[in-house]
Amino acid sequence: MAKQISDLKLGILGGGQLGRMLIQEAINYNITTLILDPDPDAPCKHIANYFECGSITDFDTVYNFGKKADIITIEIEKVNIEALDQLEKEGKQVYPQARVIRLIQDKGVQKQFFKENDIPTAPFQIVNTKEDIRKSNFSFPYILKQRKDGYDGKGVLKINNIADIEHAFDAPCLIEELIDFEKEIAVIVSRNPKGEVKTFPMVEMEFNSEANLVEFLISPSTYPEAIQQKAEEIAIHIASCLNITGLLAVEMFITKNGQILVNELAPRPHNSGHHTIEGNYVSQFEQHLRSIFNLPLGDTRAVNNAVMINLLGEKGHTGVAKYAGLEKVMALEGAYVHLYGKKYTKPFRKMGHITVVDQNRESAIEKANYIKNTLKVIS
C-alpha cells in the first residue's frame, strides 16, 4: 500500500513567515514538519515538529537535514543547491527541483531563460563589473539588479545618469530597461508531478516606493478578461517550460499600451498569494502541499474581493515589537490579522499581514486604507 500523506516527513529550508503559514496548513493534514533555519528564534520554531538551528547555505548542514525528510521544499531561494542535487540523486523528492532553484537564484540566467523560451520581458544586458556598467550603451535611466541574493527591493538600484554608476554594485549584475508600467500584477501557478496545472486569479499590486515592498494587493483584478487570461497563459507556459513541481509566483508588469512583461519568478509560496488564505477556496499554502505531495489540486477561484496589506515595522523603531491599533483593526468586519511571530521589529521588516474580505471591492479598499493608517508596529 502506498504511503499516506501523514506518513511522510516534510523538510522545509527556511523558518520564516512563509514556512510558518505552510506549517499551519500542514497541521490540517497531520503532516510532520521539519525546519532548518539559522535564526534560533525563527517564526517556525515553536510550531514545527522538529526545529534545527543551522545554515541553509552550508552543504553538510542542508544534506544531513534533508536525509531526515521524505520531501524537501523551500521558503527562500538562497539555499545550498549542491546538497539538494545530492539528495535528489539519493532518491529524496526535492520540490521545487534543485535545477529550478539554481535557475531562479541567478537573475541573469532567469532572463536568458525568458529569452530562450519566448517569454515577454524587458530588454536587458548582463554585466560583471562596475567597468562593464560604464561601458554599457543602455540609455538612462535604467534599473540595475544584482544577479544573486537580491530580495524585497534589496540589490536593486535605479541608475539615472553616469554619476550614479559610482554607487553601483561592483558585482555580476543585470541592466534592465526602465519600464513605464501602468500596474504590477502577479499570477501564482501550481503544478504537481502528474502535470496537473492550476492558476490563481491575477492580482494587482500597489508598492511602498520607499521600502520597495508590496503595500497593498487587490484580488481579483478588474482588468479586462483578455489581459487576465494572457497573464495566466504566460504563467502556465513558464511552469511547463521549467517542468516545476510546486508553486510558482510570476510577477509581471502591464505597460501603458497593455503589453505584459515578466519581471521575476519565485518558486514557492509568495507575498502575492497571502490573501488566498481567506479570499480563495484553496490557499496558496494548501495548494503548495497538494502539489508537492502529488495530490489533486484545489479550487483556486476567489470567494470574494480581498485586499491584503503588508504590516511593516515603522521607521525609527527597532526593538521588541508592539502592535498599536490592533484592537481597532480587529473590530472591523472582514479583517483577518496574521502576525508572523517575530519578537523584534526594525524599519520595513515584514511583521505580519492583514487581509480584508468584502463583497464590495471599494469597501475592502477603504478598510485597507484605514488599517494602513491605524495599525503600527512600534518598539
Image (spheres, helix red, strand yellow):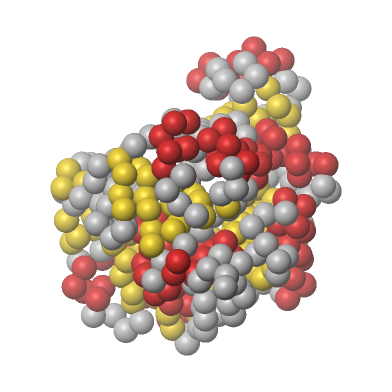
| Residue in the picture at 55% in, 80% down | 302
Q: How far from the left and from the top, in percent, is residue 114?
A: 76, 44
Q: Quadrant of residue 268?
A: bottom right
Q: How far from the left and from the top, in percent, is residue 42?
A: 29, 48
Q: Is residue 97 left or right of residue 168?
A: right
| Residue in the picture at 30% in, 40% down | 53
Q: Is residue 355 at all visible to an observer of this figure? A: no
Which residue is nearer to you in this view: 171 or 14? 14
Which residue is nearer to you in this view: 203 or 373? 203
Q: Is residue 249 left or right of residue 243?
A: left
In the image, residue 240 sits, relative to residue 286, either above or below, namely above
Q: How far from the left and from the top, in percent, is residue 367?
A: 36, 75
Q: Quadrant of the N terminus?
A: bottom right
Q: Quadrant of residue 323?
A: bottom left
Q: How many marks?
A: 0
Q: Is residue 346 at all visible to an observer of this figure? A: yes
Which residue is nearer to you in this view: 2 or 232? 2
Q: Quadrant of residue 220?
A: bottom right
Which residue is nearer to you in this view: 48 or 284? 48
Q: Is residue 135 left or right of residue 298?
A: right
In the image, residue 130 sits, relative to residue 97, either above or below, namely above
| Residue in the picture at 71% in, 27% down | 126
Q: Is residue 180 left or right of residue 16?
A: right
Q: How far from the left and from the top, in percent, is residue 245?
A: 64, 57
In the image, residue 52 sits, relative to residue 362, either above or below, namely above
In the image, residue 368 sits, relative to residue 42, either above or below, namely below
| Residue in the picture at 58% in, 37% down | 86
- Outermost front residue: 1
- Outermost bottom residue: 359
